[in-house]
Image: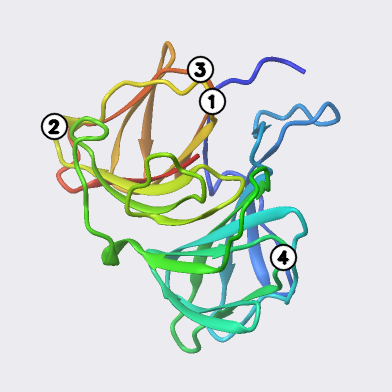
């Protein structure tokens, strides 16, 4: 296989299909394979990043993944996530962690139009106990100083994080999930990771991503895959509102 490279894709680019009973699914990124060298099959450690949409009152099927953990991130609408035997209310901005081997199902609230959420998957690599967690970024205190002028809301983090922040320590395969935002004229710092790949998902606004030697104009719904050892920086040069995005590691 060729060397991993930066990939920029909007969730609207792939054709949708129906799966998990009634979810409309857009497959954004999949794991790399020798059989399929399409540019969006780029993930090395993560196994998938897809977007689901459910009509109000509909639900996905009850299922589970052995040796794979997932999280849902709700982009729009509200509903309930059934994880094991407990139902958790979720709404836009909620991250719901699904431990490996635990049955789960999503229920869209009736009469509220569409519910849209990301589903991100990762094989389990760490030892440790974990349990279902649901956190909304609006419930988390913001922090600054970690990445230039970016304001951050840490949501989920690894169970063995040596320098724990304020995220929920539950992840066994992922490193962390955080939300960041920049006001106009501000930039995150330029940095590089030699131990992890990352995905940026833009939730609002527009800006610039510098990745390696390339410059990309990005906006709402764009998804940026960053392999290990690629220097990167995100900038809000001219968006009057917030440039907000998720960082999945």
Q: Could you tell me residue 129's position as x and y percent?
A: 61, 59
Residue at image position (58%, 83%) is 86
- Report how far apart the C-alphas of labels 1 and 3 lie in the structure: 8 Å
Q: Could you tell me if the residues under marks 2 and 3 are in contact, i.e. CB atoms within 8 Å?
A: no
* Lower position in the chain sequence, tag 3 or tag 4: 4
What residue is pinned by disc 2? 185
Look at the picture and state if 167 lies above or below 56.
above
Q: Secondary structure at mark 1?
A: loop
Q: Could you tell me residue 189's position as x and y percent?
A: 26, 25
Q: Could you tell me if the residues under marks 1 and 3 are in contact, i.e. CB atoms within 8 Å?
A: no
Q: Secondary structure at mark 3?
A: loop
Q: Dot 1 surroundings within 10 Å: few (below 14), some, or many (20 or more)? A: few
Q: Secondary structure at mark 4?
A: strand
Going by the image, does 132 lie left or right of 182?
right
Q: Dot 4 surroundings within 10 Å: few (below 14), some, or many (20 or more)? A: few
Q: Could you tell me residue 179's position as x and y percent?
A: 34, 49
Say how the picture is coloured: rainbow
What residue is pinned by disc 1? 195
- Report how far apart the C-alphas of labels 3 and 4 lie in the structure: 36 Å
- Report how far apart the C-alphas of labels 1 and 2 lie in the structure: 30 Å
- Which image quadrant is residue 136 in? bottom left
* Lower position in the chain sequence, tag 1 or tag 3: 1
What residue is pinned by disc 3? 229
Residue 141 visible in this rendered orientation of the protein: yes
What residue is pinned by disc 4? 18
């Amino acid at each position: 296989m060729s060397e991993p490279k930066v990939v920029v894709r909007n969730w609207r680019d792939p054709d949708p299909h129906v799966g998990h009973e009634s979810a409309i699914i857009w497959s954004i990124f999949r794991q790399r394979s020798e059989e399929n060298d399409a540019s969006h099959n780029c993930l090395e450690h993560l196994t998938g990043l897809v977007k689901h949409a459910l009509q109000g009152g509909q639900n996905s099927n009850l299922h589970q993944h052995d040796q794979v953990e997932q999280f849902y991130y709700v982009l729009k609408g509200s509903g309930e996530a059934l994880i094991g035997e407990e139902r958790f209310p979720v709404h836009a901005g909620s991250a719901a962690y699904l431990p490996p081997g635990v049955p789960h199902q999503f229920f869209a609230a009736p009469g509220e139009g569409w519910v849209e959420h990301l589903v991100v998957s990762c094989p389990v690599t760490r030892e440790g106990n974990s349990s279902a967690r649901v956190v909304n970024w609006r419930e988390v205190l913001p922090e600054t100083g970690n990445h230039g002028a970016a304001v951050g809301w840490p949501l989920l983090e690894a169970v063995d994080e040596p320098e724990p922040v304020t995220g929920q320590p539950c992840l066994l395969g992922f490193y962390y999930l955080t939300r960041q935002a920049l006001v106009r004229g501000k930039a995150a710092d330029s940095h590089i990771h030699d131990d992890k790949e990352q995905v940026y998902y833009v939730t609002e606004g527009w800006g610039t991503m510098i990745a390696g030697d390339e410059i990309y104009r990005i906006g709402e719904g764009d998804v940026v895959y960053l392999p290990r050892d690629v220097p990167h920086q995100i900038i809000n040069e001219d968006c009057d509102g917030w440039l907000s995005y998720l960082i999945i590691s």
